[in-house]
Image (spheres, grey):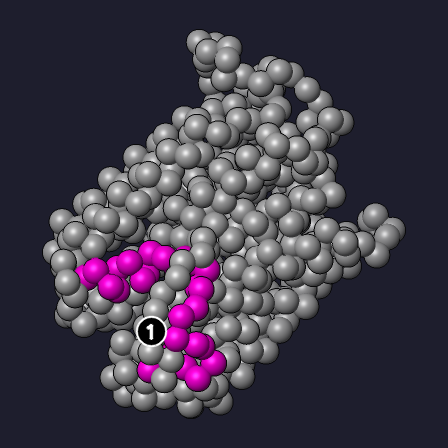
Amino acid sequence: MSSTSLPNDDEKSQEEKPPASNPSSDIPDGGFHAYLQVLGAHLLFFNSWGIINTFGVYQEYYSVALLSHESASSISWIGTLQGFLLFLVGILTGPIFDRGYFRHLIITGTFLVVFGMMMTSLGNTYYQIILAQGVCVGIGAGCLFVPSVAIVATYFTTKRALMTGITAAGGSIGTRIRVASQSVTPFLTDEYFLPGGVIFPIVFRKLQPTIGFPWATRIIAFMALFLLCIPLAIMRTRTAPPPKARALLDLSAFREAAFNIFSLALFLSFVGLYFPFFYASIYGSRITGLADDVSFYLLPVLNAGSIFGRIVPGLVADKVGSLNTIIPCAVIAAILAFAWLGITNAPGLWVFSVLYGFFSGAIVSLPPTIVALISPDLSLVGTRMGMSFTFAGLGLLIGNPIAGSILNVQDGTFKPAIAFSAATLMAGAVALIVVRAWVVKSRKGWKA
């Protein structure tokens, strides 16, 4: 174990400390209070991953307006830095959560996300945007992310994967938008529901031309502030913090093969996972001939597919096991990414966006339940989630900038970057297969 420990705060009010309990012996697995935690966690996810999933629309805006003098790779560093910090901060927020400082994390995360978006609205240079939107929002989202999934794991057992999937769909609360069907795609009607990390992109896209970039961004910040007040009101931790301060890192995890290989799988998967979310809209306008106002909707469609890809696999995982569910989803996502190499028409791109959104959703929603599965002690789940998600964050940090450096938007050269994304996704799927083999061997059962 690491020798660096968090201090025990003896002055914390007693009402914020839940009664002591055995973390694994009295898990409610349902009930009104437990489902309130899912609602609150859903909203935390909405305002962490939901905002980060919005960066695709900002990438498009920056590339043609505010930061048009910067390369696509440079601009993508802003969004990937957000995701990396969301995961990296988990190294600290995991053990802080385990120590019982849940509300402190939510208050801090709320302030940083809202403040970061407000400062983004005032930015007009690259370094200002990367500090406000990349660093400040990324750290704030990290304060919200690990608690959102860790608290759900302590309230559920047989329903854990489903409830985590509902939580992870938090970037996807339904919204109703209206477009001319012939303008968008023949597969959508005039009026339809898009669930999703759809809301923030559409808010920005619809408001930016009329009220400008600053106020469109501020409205997103005000929405986040309102929505984050709800988790503060309804969420409570179930398990008491340990009597002694816990180390920031559970270094014993690195002596477990399953944990190490799973962390490698997350790294490889997240290197390639978000390339379509960042570049599908640009691909649609440059390669398939879609108008800019139409190709924008590829990002909401990807996120719309992702809501079902986060909930449905959770239902399946509770029956057959999280690893048994995530592996076929990861393999199919990689195959779809390879198939993207041959897509040059609009209908094919719409179908790809729906299917890729669905199958990639499982890669985001199921890892927390797998960390809980391979952890010997539920009281260490927060710490171990933070550790393993750091590898995912590192993959996200380097993936899109690398892909952005090997594509050429002006010349329409996307295939090398798409192939890179697909190959890393497939490598991640292979690593997950190895994790499953190890878990099944050690537990002597097929359900993993």
Q: Is residue 76 above or below residue 95?
A: below
Q: Against 249, is 367 above or below?
A: below
Q: Quadrant of residue 372?
A: top right
**In the depicted view, which residue is nearer to us: 357 or 256?**
357
Q: Taking 57 as reference, is 171 left or right? A: right
The answer to whether residue 433 is visible is: yes
Q: How many marks?
A: 1
392, above or below 429, in the image: above
The verdict on residue 305 being magenta is no
Read off the residue under disc 1: 179
Point out the stretch of residues depicted in magenta.
Answer: 183-208
Q: Quadrant of residue 186?
A: bottom left
**Left of 58 or right of it: where is 105?**
right
Where, quadrant-wise, is the N terminus in this rendering?
top right
Residue occupying image coordinates x 71% and y 30%: 27
Residue 125 seen by the camera: no
- Coordinates of residue 74 in the picture (x, y in percent): 26, 65
Relative to 306, 110 lies left or right:
left
- On the image, the x and y values in percent for residue 216 come to 20, 55
Q: Looking at the picture, which amino acid does disc 1 mark?
A: Val
Instruction: Check disc 1 and report its element: helix, strand or loop.
Output: loop
Q: Nearer the viewer, residue 176 or 158?
A: 176
**Residue at 80%, 54% in the rendered image:** 447
